[in-house]
Image: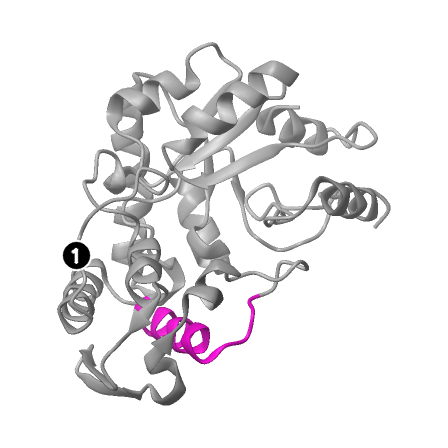
Amino acid sequence: MRLDRLVNANLEGNIPIRATAVTFDDGYANNLYEAKPILEHHDVPATVFVASGYIGHRREFWWDELDRVLLRPGRLPERLELRLSGTHHYWDLGAAVEYSEKEHRSGSLASDGKLKSSPRMSFYVSVWNKLQPLPEQDRETALERILSWANGDTGTRQTHRPLDAEEVRTLERGGLLEIGAHTVHHLSLPSHPHTVQRKEIQKGKGELEEFLGHPVNSFSYPFGNYRKDTATLVRQAGFSCACTTEEEPVWKRNDRFQLPRFGVENWSGEEFEKRMLKWFNS
């Protein structure tokens, strides 16, 4: 069922048995070209939460760009130095200097959806954790430094690119899919002052409404990160609900601005079915 219908059913204390709302975060172009045809074929509604600042962006989302540069097969320099928010950070790569084609082909996720352990993957995760809480401009500066250090480029893979404005409008055409907000720059909101949080929440909503020509009512916290005061800002911005990444079913007493969701990884159909049944029975 649609997310708004699920929220209303929850408010009424009358969620149907095994009711499910499907959501996608960020605003990838493949939501339109890969997901929408499948959803339409099976008549499954969904909500796509879009970070408005990435609409029409000529580069990948920052975490994908970092992935493309640091997790490509080959050799990296032995030491990385970054100055982040006035503090110097150093990484001596050691065994992570080399990354084989075999390691790359094996993928970054194990069958259980967890990150595989390897020196290069550990290095990537460590850098990711340092970039994630930064202000947008600081993060862009750090990413440019990493690209230069790794002799990388700013090319965009078609499989990873964000939606453009016309694609956002096309995505919701037909009424089965709705667009929700996901801030402007996909910031980890609790890492920033209230003024920044409020601007990201309100501006992201306003920009999407300008693209679409109608109100945008649902919201998703980037990275699932929020505090109670963040949820208050979302409520004050005029949204009707907000999704977290806390993994549990929606219960009658759930705050509609702190809705839990189960994350779906790159599983086989058999594994996905097994987990769905577990979630329904939890």
The residue wearing badge 1 is: 153
Q: Pinpoint residue 55: horizontal percent, then vertical percent.
A: 26, 35
The magenta segment is 115-131
Mark 1 crowd level (few <14, some 14–19, many ≥20, 10 Å Cα): few
Is 130 in the magenta?
A: yes
Q: How would you classify the magenta stretch by its main secondary structure?
A: helix
**Left or right, 280 with reference to 225:** right
Looking at the rendering, in which quadrant would you find the N terminus?
A: top right
Q: Along the line of sight, which residue is nearer the eye, 4 or 43?
A: 43
Residue 46 image offset from top left, x and y in percent:
55, 27
Is residue 47 found left or right of 276 in the rendered image?
left
Q: Secondary structure at mark 1?
A: loop
Does 112 appear above or below 234? below
Which quadrant holds residue 269? top right
Q: Residue at (80%, 33%) from the top-left corner?
A: 18
Relative vertical location of residue 162 with respect to residue 176 in this rendering, above or below: below
**Could you tell me the amino acid type at mark 1?**
Asp
Q: Is residue 175 left or right of residue 54?
A: right
